[in-house]
Amino acid sequence: MKQHFPLKNVQQERRIYRNRIFIAVGLVLFCFCVLIARYFYLQVVHYKDFSTASDNNRIRLQPIAPTRGYIYDRNGILLADNYPVFTATLSKADVDDIDETVERLKPILDLSEDDIEKFNTRIKTAKKTERVALKLNINEAEIARFSEAKYQFPGVQIETQMTRYYPYGELFAHIIGYVGRINDKELKSINKDTYAGTNLIGKSGVERYYENLLHGIPGNEAVEADAHGNILRHLGRKEPAQGDDLYLSIDYGLQVVASEQLAGRRGAVVAINPKTGEILALVSSPSFNPNLFVTGISGKDYAALRDNLDQPLYNRAVQGTYPPGSTIKPVEGLGGINYGVVDWSTAIHDPGYFQLPGDPHKFRDWKKTGHGLVNMNKAIQESCDTYFYILANQMGIEHMNEWMRQFGFGAKTGLDLPSESAGIYPNPEWKMKNYKSKWLRGETISVSIGQGAFTATPVQLAMAIAILSNQGKHITPHVLSSVKGALPHPIHNDTDGMVQFNGTQDDWLKMRDAMVDVINHGTGRSIKTNAYQIAGKTGTAQVKSIAQGKKYNEALLTQREYDHGLFVGFAPAENPEIAIAVIWENGRHGGAAAHIAKPVFDYWMVQRKTNPIKPTAQQINGGLMTAGLKPGQLPSAGRMLEADPNAISSSSPVANLVKPTSTPAASSRATGDVPDTDISE
């Protein structure tokens, strides 16, 4: 009988099916457990971390740059203002490929290599959400081109930001200085949180010296943004703290007058209050327009300034070092009295030259025939070189150095402006250190008339003559008068102390009278006035060395080889309100420099009290760099006298280029001061 087998094994198939069901369910359960575990990890274990990261993708804390403090003169005239400009900005969070984006924006925004370099420097250290300026001061044409292509540049925005404006351009450039884009070197030293959102920093002058007061404290704003960086909602805001307003001791009118006297000339004028040390005017000529630097000076404009033979960027008043010539004779004369070498009755016979014992070399007086019998008063009045040759030879360089340094020569004055030069008051130690050679007796003779290696800045000369007018009381020059802000600041204290002098008060008064005689009868008599009494001293500093036995012939010299003209003085003589130092490069003689000082004296002593010079609206807006705005649209255009002058207290807190190479070598030609009665302005 044939056996039949079933076509399928039902029991076996059921067992296989059941096993597959168990395996599938197990896999599903396993995957579900893994998913639950992952959700637990994300939602519970790391909830705060991922929640914060999620918020950061849409909620940003953007820095808000503070408004920079304003700068005013002593009368409340606005000297440094803020105004809005259009600025292209972007952040790391909004742009995936920054280099590619910048490259495509070059023709649209007319980006220069300098713009790109400064942007790249700043974007490297900026926070992820911080918006960094790509270009400041965008014009209307650039804005129009960008608007047409904006859809191609998600994350790039045109914003309005505040920048600096100097209404009077060149007039205060060497005092106030200017601000500029933060560079790589500055990024390494500044607090990046303090400068978050800020593009500008003080580069020179008051803007640099008082950067910590002017800058302010940044704020921030929480915003909700989409993936392209477009702001959807404003969630909260912490307002920035504006920088402090600074009131300078500078007088606008006096600055105008001093600048006018130096117009077209190379030189400097420094006017100081001899009682307080306040700088009333500080002019370096030629000057420059600081507005060019604020949003980035072009390579062409910078090259023109840098390569200009007259060096307009160089602050001659603070950095310029010049042989002081005969202007130091009153101070030196008091030194002779201090050490008992001479007194007011000591007289010498001047044949027109001086010779050291055993030396045939003749140190000549500016007056070839000599001055005859000369005492101290006559030596000051007629600027007799021979008298001071003899005085210096007897006093010695060590005593001279000790004495002159009490008046600030050979050291920085402490003026609150950057890059001040110390000048040189030479001595044997200085020469050995710098030239590895011994001091020669003849060098003492050259130093005695402000020549040789002796150099000083106009600020040093102004301080020295102020100390003399104070009968030896020290003062520290400063341009800051007071600070107006949220927090109190230290009060500026003048240096305490007096010049250590072994003479009497009568000696100070006699030296003052000798300087009065300079103006009434001597080398400065051409600026004599009956309105008030000036005490002064002229000086002439040799630029071109003349060999022994040779005659000085100006016709053979170029204009830049002419002697420098200098003047120092104070007025009124009996109770000084102003002291002035003037240097006119290649001005030929001190009488010419005195003519520059005279209108400055006149303004302060007479005109200021009855008819002070004030700025006009045209002067305020004349140099404005436009950024889609016209001068009349500036919010500060009519604010020049907004500040209350009465708010200014009587107390206060407190890019070098190649320097002029006019320091002369010692020579046989003396550079006293020829009396001048016919000097044309």
Image (spheres, grey):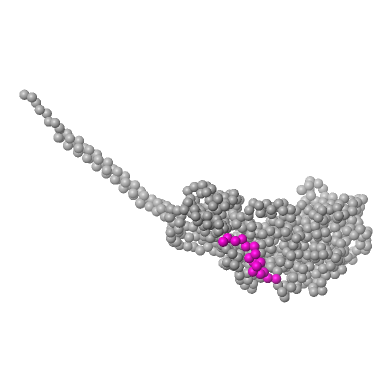
Residue 424 lies left or right of residue 387; in this view the side is left
Outermost left residue: 1
Please tell me whether residue 589 is drawn above or below residue 548 in the rendered image: below
Residue found 84% across the figure and 50% down from its top: 440
Q: Nearer the viewer, residue 311 or 143?
A: 143
Is residue 624 inside the magenta stretch? yes
Q: Quadrant of the N terminus?
A: top left
Residue 670 position in % (x across, y down): 86, 56
Please tell me whether residue 625 is drawn above or below residue 32 in the rendered image: below
Q: Nearer the viewer, residue 237 or 91?
A: 91
Q: Nearer the viewer, residue 154 or 594?
A: 154
Is residue 2 inside the magenta stretch? no
Q: Main secondary structure of the magenta part?
A: loop
Residue 184 lies left or right of residue 453; in this view the side is left
Please tell me whether residue 239 is drawn above or below residue 22 in the rendered image: below
The magenta stretch spans which residues? Answer: 613-628
Can residue 275 be seen here? The reply is yes
Quarter-of-image position of residue 270:
bottom right
Residue found 68% across the figure and 70% down from its top: 614
Residue 88 lies left or right of residue 10; in this view the side is right
Residue 196 position in % (x across, y down): 53, 56
Residue found 70% across the figure and 59% down from its top: 287
Quarter-of-image position of residue 326:
bottom right
Q: Quadrant of the C terminus?
A: bottom right
Residue 398 position in % (x across, y down): 81, 55
Residue found 91% across the figure and 51% down from its top: 549
Residue 518 position in % (x across, y down): 84, 67
